[in-house]
Image: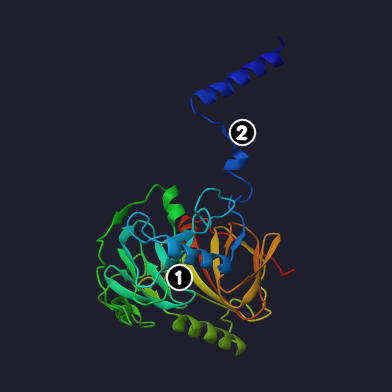
Amino acid sequence: MTTIDQDQVALDQLYRDFSAYNLIPLWTARDDLMPLTPRPAAVPHVWRWSDLYPLAQRSGDLVPVGRGGERRAIALANPGLPGLPYATPTLWAAIQYLGPRETAPSHHHTQTAFRFVIDGEGVWTNVEGDPVAMRRGDLLLTPSWAFHEHQNVTDNPMAWIDGLDIPLVHQLDAGFFEFGPDELSVTETPDRSRNERLWGHPGLRPIGAPDQPSSPLMAYRWAHTDAALTAQLELADEGHPVALGPGHAGVRYTNPTTGGDALVTIRTEFHRLRAGVRTEPARIVGSAVWQVFEGEATVTLGEERFAVKKGDLFAVPSWCEFSLEAVTQVDLFRFSDEPVYDALGFTRLARQATR
């Protein structure tokens, strides 16, 4: 046996011994462990509201709400993450459907959550015993470990979008869950919740209230969001450089006690593009899910282009080149995992000139 053959035999034995002792050498795995750029398993994908809502309606006829499953929520499953109910590796999104006069029982969990309402009203979400009305265009928060329950007080069904950090918490092995009482903690349906009465005054905060990690304001109302976007574009027309770009307004939902993101692990934003406006192609580390609130647009995700309209949702994986073009004036809600990347120092953004 030659020296070369002897070396090969020894090398083969070395790798067998690595495997026997549950070891993997870096030099065989570097490309996967430390790629030159992110290689997300998630893929760009669009979920159509015209498909989602009828399926939710059918679920309402056939699947009860109650203990065990807890919620009639249908998760968006990214085709790049087969078998997992995840929109991206860190974000969970679902359509939740509550039928006439139905209630969803109380529970709480480590996972941070929000609700965004594309249409309808008549449901109140009780967060820590504080009843919060849910209406079209509203963002409703449920911070980590806050008890919450829902009730529909009307004779009509209602559906909305839930967003949570379930995949992130799962990967971190940090999840806890507890059931609350079977009966609603409160049945009142006030127009304004206690948290809105205390915190819902622009630019003003109660001096005696301490800072909190997540926003103590549980409801961000559409009337305020719409007014802010409208004013931003009007000021831009007057020559003030306040918009994200020509014809492109954007706002971020923030925590009034810190000025940071409203939720610790999830960034929430709202964007408005005038008809014909196109954003510059960009890549960002971290993933996002968008929902069209009103209007029509074309979204470019990598090499693919999709026409989207009211209610449609789409996932933007990490480092996927992304741009939007408004067909009509279009309003879009966006949520992402960016606060996590910011906290870890992993934030990176790359823009390029519009082609």
Amino acid type at image mark 1: Ala
Question: In the picture, residue 303 is in which quadrant?
Answer: bottom right
Q: Quadrant of the C terminus?
A: bottom right
- Check the image and report above or below for 103 versus 15: below
Residue 82, position as x, y percentages in the image: 56, 48
Q: What residue sits 32% from the left and 59% below the top?
A: 108
Circle 1 residues within 10 Å: few <14, some 14–19, many ≥20: many
Which residue was labeled with disc 2? 28
In the structure shown, which secondary structural element does the residue marked by tag 2 occupy? helix
Q: Earlier in the sequence, mark 1 or mark 2?
A: 2
Q: Which mark is residue 159?
A: 1
- Check the image and report above or below for 119 versus 25: below
Q: What residue sits 49% from the left and 85% below the top?
A: 227
Amino acid type at image mark 2: Thr
Q: Are the residues flagged by discs 1 and 2 in contact, CB closer than 8 Å?
A: no
Residue nearer the viewer, 211 or 93? 93
Q: What residue sits 47% from the left and 60% below the top?
A: 74
Residue nearer the viewer, 97 or 146? 97
In the structure shown, which secondary structural element does the residue marked by tag 1 occupy? strand
In the displayed structure image, the side of residue 292 where residue 137 appears, left or right = left
Total of numbered circles in the picture? 2
Question: In the picture, residue 297 is in which quadrant?
Answer: bottom right
Distance from disc 1 to disc 2, alpha carbons, whole Å, reads 49 Å
Residue 305, position as x, y percentages in the image: 69, 65
